[in-house]
Amino acid sequence: MVNRIFEKDKYFIPCLRRLFPKEPILAVKGRGAVLTDSKGKDYIDLFASHGVNFVGFNRPEVVSAIKEQAEKLVNYAYDIHTTPAVELAEKLVQIAPEPLKKCYFLNSGAEAVECALYLARKYKGKYEIIGLYGGFHGRTYGARSALGWSAYKRGMGPFLPGFIHMPSYYCYRCTLNLEYPDCNLQCAKMLEDVLQYQCSGEVAAFIAEPVQGTAGNIPAPNRYFKEVKRILDSYDILYIDDEVYTGLGRTGKLWGVEHYGVKPDIMTLAKTLGGGVPISAVMASKETASAFAVKDMLYFTTYGGNPLCCAAALASVNIVTGEKLHERAARLGEYFMKGLNDLADKYELIGDVRGKGLMIGVELVKNRRTKEPAHEESLKLRNEAKKRGVILPSAMGWLGNTIRMTPPAVITEQQIDHVIEVLDASLKTLK
Ligand SMILES: Cc1ncc(COP(=O)(O)O)c(C=O)c1O
């Protein structure tokens, strides 16, 4: 039966790499930080489906909210009010960073970014957008144009005109060959050069993640966004804060941007928002949001604000704020990183341990001096960890050598201890 399911894989358009192509897992249920397969084997999941399951798999509150709403009304579009959509909007506005006072719901992270780009261009009446090397914003054409990563673009161009990219804050492999903090944040200061030399005075917005997720869970250094925002303000350019991954607690604060003490003009969120269902949001200041007037119907999607998804999302957001899961993520993130740093003392293969909250990147290198990426080892490690009951999102990131850990925030210290033991045993096999 199970094998018959795997055989049916052939009906998919093959555009994604399965985590375990040779010995696949058939996921049948999840609880807390644990995913269970069809053979009844439990895995502590450090991937949590691209970080989505921050509040834990199948939280009873989310499941009940879905069931209750499904009994009443599964779908209606924005044209008519529904209670979950309105209540979710109110809740998000209450907890969003200043000055974000308006929100709009969509279906995926990429679509939220897409909408944010439209809003920025419409508000400014300008078209240029500056993004970062390694920035990831999704796979629709606008979002993909904004991402600074050629591997995601090859063979599919041309992309939208007006997108410009500059080196990011990847301190472990600084493009400018400098070292933090002596670099004096040259990568942020370069924004001024980019505006002077690459742009045509038509810049609407700068877009960035507070912690680059897909690139390998790379946090920006402390003063990075202060420096960027200073320049943006002096040129009157909008700041789009892409919190699709980081938003709602993942980094140890409710919003990733809170680590940096700056105010976004537009913010995107998804993943944690839905507690597992597909929903995303764009938030904007009143001023910026005013660019989309009702009469123009400039952005609309049939499923945006779907009451079933909004009910689930409201439950998810209430769990985060009610249980202060961001604070838990901060505490457990530190605990996890301590264990990982102890492993780094033991294994040369570990080149870098970094992160914020429960968004942790561990980079594997063949040689600590040359930093040659250890991709094969990273793949092997994934399979070794799987044998021992841990889903390890390794062989990822910019160079395919990073473990991108984004476990549910309900993971326990005992589970983290177990993960460290599994990693220790798995790393031993690679020696
Ligand atoms: C920062 C960021 N923005 C946007 C996206 C796109 O989200 P989605 O895959 O839901 O379209 C992602 C996906 O990982 C992301 O990490």
Image (spheres, grey):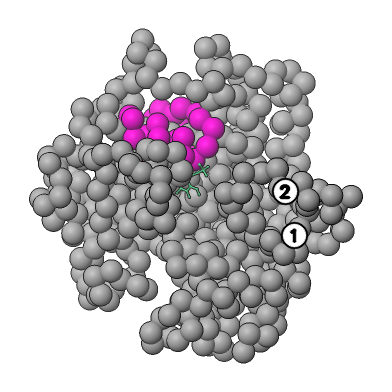
Viewer-side residue, 57 vs 327 = 57
User: Is residue 159 among the parts visible in the rendering?
Assistant: yes
On the image, the x and y values in percent for residue 219 come to: 40, 62
Instruction: Please check the rendered image and state whether residue 330 is part of the magenta-colored stretch, yes or no.
Output: no
User: Is residue 259 among the parts visible in the rendering?
Assistant: no
Q: Give the amino acid type for the residue marked by disc 2 in the picture.
A: Asp
Residues under numbered marks 1 and 2 in contact, where contact means CB atoms less than 8 Å apart: yes
Residue at 63 percent across and 85 percent down: it is: 430
Viewer-side residue, 382 vs 90 = 382
> 431 above or below 39?
below
Judged from this view, the residue extending furthest toward the right is: 1
Disc assigned to residue 24: 1
> 399 above or below 154?
below
Q: Nearer the viewer, mark 1 or mark 2?
A: 2
Disc assigned to residue 9: 2
Estimate how packed mark 2 is, as few (under 14), some (14 to 19) or many (20 or more) residues with alpha carbons within 10 Å: few
> 177 above or below 234?
below
Q: Secondary structure at mark 1?
A: loop
Q: Quadrant of the C terminus?
A: bottom right
> 20 above or below 270?
below
